[in-house]
Image (cartoon, rainbow, N blue to C red):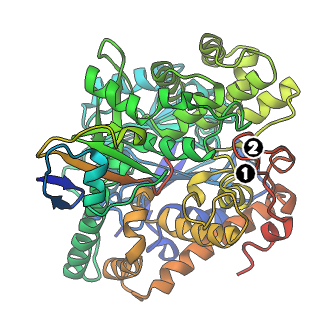
Amino acid sequence: MWKKLTVDMNNLSVKKEDVEEEYRDLGGRGLIAQYMINNVDPKCDPLGKENQLLICNTIFAGTNLTTAHRISVGGKSPLTGGIKESNSGGYLGYQLAGHGIKMIAVKDIPQKEGLWLLHIDSKGEIKLKDASDYKGLNNYEFVEKIFEKYGQDAATMSIGVGGERNYKSASIQLSEYKGGHPSRAAARGGLGSLMGSKGLKGIIIEKAENRFKPDYADEEKFKELSIKFNKMVASGAKNHPFHNIGTLSTIESTGENGILPVENFSGKLSKDYKKVGAKQFMENLASRGGSNKIACQPGCVVQCSNCYNDKDNNYLTSGFEYETIALFGPNCKIYDLDVIAQMDRICDDIGVDTIDIANGIAVSMDAGKIEWGDSEAALGLMKEMKDGTDFGKILGNGCEAVGKHLGAKRIPVVKHQALAAYDPRNTKGTGITYSTSPMGADHTAGLTMGRAFDDRGRAAQAYVSNKLQVAIAFYDSMMCLFTFSHAANNLPLLGELWAALYGGSSDFSRVAQLGVKTILTERAFNKGAGMTLDDDKLPEFFCTEKSAATGSKFDIDDYELEVIFDF
Amino acid sequence: MIKINEISIKFKEGMTILDAIIEGKKSINQNTIIMVNNSIVEKDVLDKLQIDDNSEIKILRITDGG
Ligand code: SF4
């Protein structure tokens, strides 16, 4: 039977019990939505005692289904003020499932200032330990010390000074499988700040001596179906750019069609993006060392991750992704992969979201605080964030805080969260997703690029965004999104897998209902938190300014946004 | 022989990468990346670069964002 851990930070206790029936066959984003609406007052202070930090395994955790050990982190977001689910790769989901734990709910806040570690040892003994020695450590140093003490096979999840200082863009960093670097992130929505408010510096999970096995409804059937599913994903991944290059490959498409953000979403596209493109990345790997085709969690057949080294072939960063490269790169007019890799490393180390911080830097450039393309000045601002200067704290609070502080007119946020690296005028369905997703401007909630008839046209954009948002809502409950395009032609298989694991109907409608229910539940939470239809809008400048690359504006009627979830 | 994704085509002396792609009945557009023997080749030189026998061409279609 799957277990739930309840960690009470007020009396520093940990309780382990069976997962309630209602949550038994849920996982990931769907579980977070249901638990939050049942247990957390939407009006609560995100950093106060009533909010909870949730760490959830997926529906398929504990099985050999590829990427089933994605971990979802949730709570009321300190950044958006609404519900947040931010999921991450890394080793922790696999280790947590090994101990038979489906979810951890961290409640309340400590009575006195302090920091603690949640430690699960190889025998399954769980302790909340004093972590004052780790105060002020950033993630790389923290992980190094943890590995010295608990061994390289421990999985970690931690906050750096970003979370300790309650920066609104603070991330939670997870150690990757094998490499151990804390470069995987539950980055969006400031959940690191929520973890910091609980006084929780990290979670350490040692490999279980006796690995937990789920109670399959039909184990043989599940085995047969999962082999089929894994083969299907592996076969699709073989000729997919994420496996052969990495997510950075996306820049080769967005750079061609004007979707790539340039100079704070002005659309002033130039071929310079090639300097930070896939070819340059692969050439650097070939000439220096470093590698791609890395699995961030055991059993991943897509293997989109990487390890990027500096000119002297020393490790610089890993999990070096498209969003980070596009937003610190062309969107800040910085065309040097090594500099961007340093920025990625700094963000992972402090524990802040690269998307919100890179947008904050671009807004600083647009507002004239520093020059376009001045990477030294940009690194200087990031150092301020690390040191905690007045402006550094503002930057740590994300793009909107920077824009407001500087009196900027063009602040690319929805629900206070910065846009990912897709210009919504040139992929309008993605603009609809940014506007209407309960998560705020989040590309992973339903990126329509390449899926609508014409990315810049208006036809069917709301339809595609709606379908994808529903699909992603159930997918985020099940596994890593990067298997989606390989599984998309056989989604009914998910219903069969779900039934073989937990019993119940194998009909795909059960899966689709999970997606619909999750989104409606999240929207109900946000409504309770005070959000209205006015929060489902892109910043005005996307509707009034033409993209310099294409001449397109975001011209989707408000009405289409308002009815998108009228199922 | 030249391998293009899952299929093999016969190598012809002097053939360019583009010739091989056409021979393999594969299409390319702005959402594709072409790799030859694990190196990315820009689309504007596909018709200028000759390909060696026993090469492997991968035509990768971008379907997701990162
Ligand atoms: S596809 Fe990439 S992000 Fe997803 S589990 Fe595999 S390596 Fe991690």
Residue A289 visible somewhere in the drawing: no
Disc 2 C-beta below 8 A from ligand 1: no
Secondary structure under badge 2?
A: loop
Which chain's residue wears label 2? A
Front residue of this view, candidates A398 and A486? A486
Amino acid at dot 2: Ser
Local crowd at mark 1 within 10 Å, few (<14), some, or many (≥20)?
many
Left or right, A188 with reference to A274: right
Disc 1 C-beta below 8 A from ligand 1: no
**Residue A357 position in % (x across, y down):** 64, 30
Q: Which residue is mark 1?
A: A425
Left or right, B19 with reference to A278: left
Q: State the quadrant of the N terminus of chain A.
A: bottom left
Residue A152 visible somewhere in the drawing: yes
| Res A547 label | 2
| Res A497 label | none
**Residue A50 position in % (x across, y down):** 70, 51
Q: State the quadrant of the C terminus of chain A.
A: bottom right
Front residue of this view, candidates A72 and A46? A72
Which residue is depicted at the point 57% across and 33% down? A354
Snapshot quadrant of residue A174: top left
Q: CA distance from mark 1 to mark 2?
A: 7 Å
Which residue is depicted at the point 51% across and 24% down? A340
Amino acid at dot 1: Arg
Question: Contact (CB < 8 A) between labels 1 and 2?
Answer: yes
Left or right, A340 with reference to A78: left
Snapshot quadrant of residue A48: top right
Which residue is depicted at the point 72% across and 74% down? A565
Local crowd at mark 2 within 10 Å, few (<14), some, or many (≥20)?
many
